[in-house]
Amino acid sequence: MKNLLFIASMLSILLPTAPALADKLDADQKAVLITGATTGIGRATAEHLAAEGYFVYAGARKDADIEALNKIDNIMAVRLDVTKQDQVDAAVKLIENQGRGLWGLVNNAGVAVFAPLTEAKQADLEFIFEVNVFGVFRITQAFAPMIIESKGRIVNVSSISGIWSAPTAGMYSGSKHALEAMTDSLALELRELGVHVTAVNPGSFASAGFAKDCGRTLDDTEADWGHLEDIRQWRIDRCKIQEESGHKSAAADPIVVALTIEQALFEDQPRARYLVASQAGTGETIAWGIREVLALNIGHDHSYTRDEIVQLIDLLWPYMSGKKSWNSQDDEWETHDSWIERRLPEKD
């Protein structure tokens, strides 16, 4: 049962002691870099943080977007395509030369393409991972020294699709599942340096990325999704409606996610995950996580009983809910260790 001790210890390190924070109204204005800040969640977050008095470096690719962002108080647009290393390097130099330092990094830039895995194009999979995974990798490596120096925060904008998936969403979900794993590893690696790393998991919110995927769907007249062709036709119908409306999304306003990102960046006791979704999306995500835990528990020599799983949940609940601070060196481990010992086979 030592495996359970290891798993629980991995969970506990995702609740580190938060770095000491100065009030956001202090003279030292905290600076945050947001990738993909031209539309959707990124734009809403940039505008909100700037209005709250933080300084925002807003990543953008197009001249028109850069010009528009630079007109907003407390925002400096940065030409930043996360797939181009030369632009990443130039952004580092620009922000270093500004002399403000960097408190927060929000890895928000992302793309989405939907198709059955049996019918999808490899180029689409590579495109998604180039932005959603390798883009985060490039940006994080480049700006990690500045974040470490400030003992700041890194927020990765993941998705509820990083927890579960659905037909035709395998490529997108795969990239977000990868981001979830990267977030956990980075949190472990930077914890002792005073940096907190977290993931924000939004549900369905207004996003230009999904509108662009609609455009690709409508343009690809030769696509054939085989036995899932009915899903493609449903998507075509939905995309046509969206196109006729001028791509006005019926999804929720991303300001809700912006407020959550602010919380992850600046609250005194940051969490490992921030789920922000509709009631249905929240329920499905939590249910999926529970199903996965139960599936892992079935059919082997070390399975736990229902009562034991409930007991473990009760043990972890105060720490995962933030009611107690769980440090790996404190006395709380004695309670956990004794629980594990009760499940170990008696020695001869």
Image (cartoon, rainbow, N blue to C red):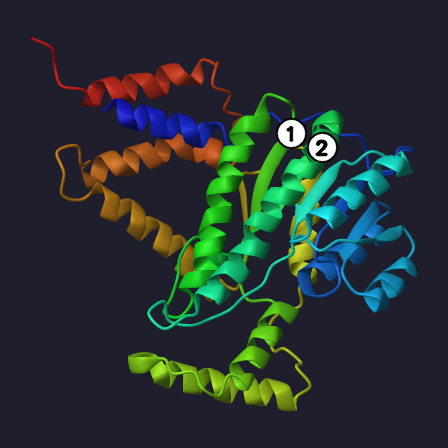
Q: Which residue in the rendered view is the most extreme toward the top?
A: 348
Q: Is residue 275 above or below residue 98?
A: below
**Where residue 185 appears, x then y in whole percent?**
49, 34
Q: In the image shown, does 147 or 159 lie closer to the viewer?
A: 147
Q: Split into 4 quadrants, where in the image is the N terminus?
A: top left
| Percent position of residue 271, x then y | 56, 38
- Quarter where residue 55 is shown: top right
Q: 219 left or right of 234?
A: right
In this orientation, does residue 207 appear? no
Which of the 4 image quarters holds residue 4? top left
Q: Nearer the viewer, residue 94 or 121?
A: 121
Disc 2: which residue = 147
Q: Mark 1 — residue?
A: 195
Residue drawn where x is 75% and y is 31% of the image? 146
Q: Earlier in the sequence, mark 2 or mark 1?
A: 2
Report, in whole angstroms, how far the alpha carbon at label 2 lies from the one at label 1.
Answer: 7 Å
* Label 1: element kind: loop
Quadrant of image for the C terminus: top left
Residue type at mark 2 is Ile
Q: Are marks 2 and 1 in contact (CB under 8 Å)?
A: yes
